[in-house]
Amino acid sequence: MKRWLLSALLPVAIAASGISMAIPAKAEPFEIVHTTWVGYGPLYLARDLGYFKEEGIDVKLTTVEEKSLQMAAVMSGNVAGAAGTVDEFLLYMKEGTCLKYVLALDESSGGDGILARDEIKTIADLKGKKIAFNEGSVSQFWLNVILKENGMSQDDIEMVNMTADDAAAAFMANRVDVAVTWEPHLTEVRNAKQGHILIDSSKSPGVITDVITVSCDTAEKRKDEIKALVRGWNRAVEYWKAHPDEANAIMAKGVGGWLSDPASFADSAKGVRFFDAATNKSYFGTPGQPGDLYKIVDFAINIWGGLGKLQMTPKAEDFIADAFVNQ
């Protein structure tokens, strides 16, 4: 009875004394939205192995396939960040928008490709052909990179706007001559022997790279969590290097979707290169010694600007935050 009275009266006594009894609020999860892509696997690996928690961050990973919905959530502050390719974030930048690239995740090294009929043997042969790709996506960006490198532009082809999945399906159904898509569709076409892969992303290293982007407000207010995110990611990549089979099984379960089978995940992982700590430091560089990320951003600004897709003309140095990978 005495213990009960003490516990009942103690809050009253403390309140009367003016001492605050406020219970610290539990920190909100650091939520990251992303599409279904093999390159995001180490995020799930770091989460499920407990690396993020050990480093001091509670990461929540949410699959949102539509980029516009992802960006709306980031800009409104409903989520902490989004994973996506370097180039596509530029499409959502406008006056009053402040975003920061804080961590590079992976590079497509064969995971994206251009499917073509057997008679189409060179990039020059694409002239005048119907090419299916998702307008405003990394597929359009990469295709324009390839065309530009070969002295061509989008004006030289006939665009058919489709998602990457629909583009592959249209190609398999002989409705288009060419399709820009990604795995698992490249493997499907290869196995079915319906056409061939004209070129894949291994021939353009560094162009298709995924990063995590946050708002400037998040970069400032949650900087310690972002540093913890980077450390957790780095540990996960090292675990994958040492234990690929175990890591692939964990990542397949986490990413899910068409990658839920460990064998499919492992096969798709051959088409990407996960960025470890050293690669991130080199890729970001510093303001005094900029890394390749600056070149890719400038290249993307040139491509998207030429297509009239930018709402403003950003500068790479304004949104590349190298402090987190260089901690």
Image (cartoon, grey):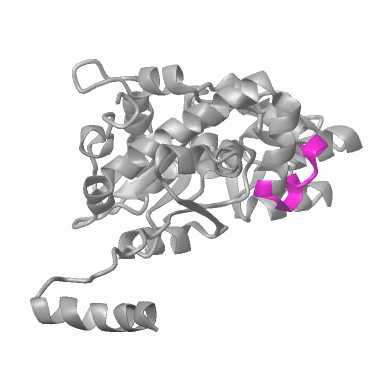
- Report the residue at 35% width, 54% height from top: 92
Q: Quadrant of residue 1?
A: bottom left
Residue farthest toward the left in the current orientation of the protein: 18
Q: Is residue 93 left or right of residue 118?
A: left
Q: Where's residue 286, x and y in %?
A: 25, 21
Secondary structure mostly taken by the magenta-highlighted segment of the chain: helix
Could you tell me if residue 193 is visible in this image? no
The answer to which of 310 and 101 lies nearer the viewer is 101
- Report the residue at 37% width, 50% height from top: 91
In the rendered view of the protein, which quadrant contains the C terminus?
Answer: top left
Let me know if residue 256 is in the magenta part: yes
Where are the magenta residues, as a range? 254-264
Could you tell me if residue 184 is visible in this image? yes
* 12 lies above or below 91: below
Q: Where's residue 324, x and y in %?
A: 31, 32
* 288 lies above or below 118: above
Q: Where's residue 46, x and y in %?
A: 55, 38
Q: Quadrant of residue 259?
A: top right
Q: Is residue 308 left or right of residue 38?
A: left
